Amino acid sequence: MNVHELALAGLNDHRLFTTLDLAGTFAFAISGAVAARKRGLDWFGVAVIAFTVACGGGVLRDLCIGAVPPAGLTDWRYLAVAMVATLMTIAANKLVVRLTHPVILFDSIGLGLFAVTGAQKAMIFGHNAEVAVLLGIVTAVGGGVVRDVLLNRVPVILQRDIYASAALVGASIEVAGERLGWLSSGRTWVALAACFALRYLSLRYRWNLPRSSRHDSKGAD
């Protein structure tokens, strides 16, 4: 492969990363906006929650890998995408509500997108596989945690739902595929599909992680 082909491949990878990152921002912004509307917040509050959810995980990731200032705060596209998603949610609320569990749907989409892009960016900055997987999870769940805290709810990752585990699967596939030399676009879509499918199926069929029983807790006390 010559220099021109290498440059073209890098450009295509960058475009794919940016596209997926903005798509995740859009999905999480809708998730945050819908959740904020259900809590009865005004339009400004809805916009704040939407932007925080959309960019919170990415900002945490960028701070961890030293990509400062974070892209979510310096790149106008992230703010624009979050605000467009917010306006669409406000203007087309009836359409959004018709979707089955809209918050869960868009949250699941954003989860897969951010798990992959979080791992990708960590690898781009030269971090090892373990760091890439961990930051993929942080990117995926960070915004949802901030949303739940601001809306005074128990964060999803602290409940029985398969949430962070799905992000772990997606990030791990992305990192493993990169280490094994899989085609960039191929491994990305496989990782996205695996993360989303695990999250969706766990909700549909009520799969949950095991937890300690009350009897065990009393015994420990």
Image (cartoon, rainbow, N blue to C red):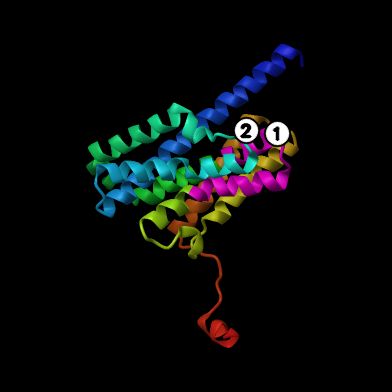
Q: Main secondary structure of the magenta part?
A: helix
**In the rendered image of this protein, does residue 10 appear above or below residue 109?**
above
Q: Position of residue 150 (x, y in %)?
A: 38, 54
Q: Is residue 153 left or right of residue 112?
A: left
> What is the three-letter code of the residue carrying label 1?
Trp
Q: Residues within 10 Å of mark 2 (few under 14, many from 20)?
A: few
Q: Along the horizontal axis of the image, is 146 left or right of 90?
A: right
Return the residue at label 2. Answer: 186
Magenta segment, which residues? Answer: 116-142
Q: On screen, 152 above or below 10?
A: below
Residue situated in front as seen by the camera: 100 or 20: 20
Residue 26 quadrant: top left
| Tag 1 secondary structure | loop
- The numbered disc on residue 182 is 1
Label placed on residue 25 = none
Picture coordinates of residue 191, whole percent (x, y): 59, 42
Residues tagged 2 and 1 counted as in contact (Cβ below 8 A): yes
At horizontal 33% and vertical 45% (from top left) the residue drawn is 33
Going by the numbered disc 2, the residue's amino acid type is: Gly
Percent across and percent down for residue 15 are 56, 24
Whether residue 170 sits left or right of residue 86 in the image: it is: right
Q: Is residue 13 above or below residue 153?
A: above
Question: Dot 1: few (<14), some (14–19), or many (≥20) neighbours within 10 Å?
Answer: some
- Taking the spot 27% from the left edge, 47% from the top edge, the residue there is 97
Q: In this view of the protein, can residue 3 be seen by the observer?
A: yes
The residue positioned 55% from the left and 55% from the top of the image is: 164
* Residue name at image x 33 percent, y 51 percent: 35
Q: Is residue 63 or residue 39 the one in the foreground?
A: 63
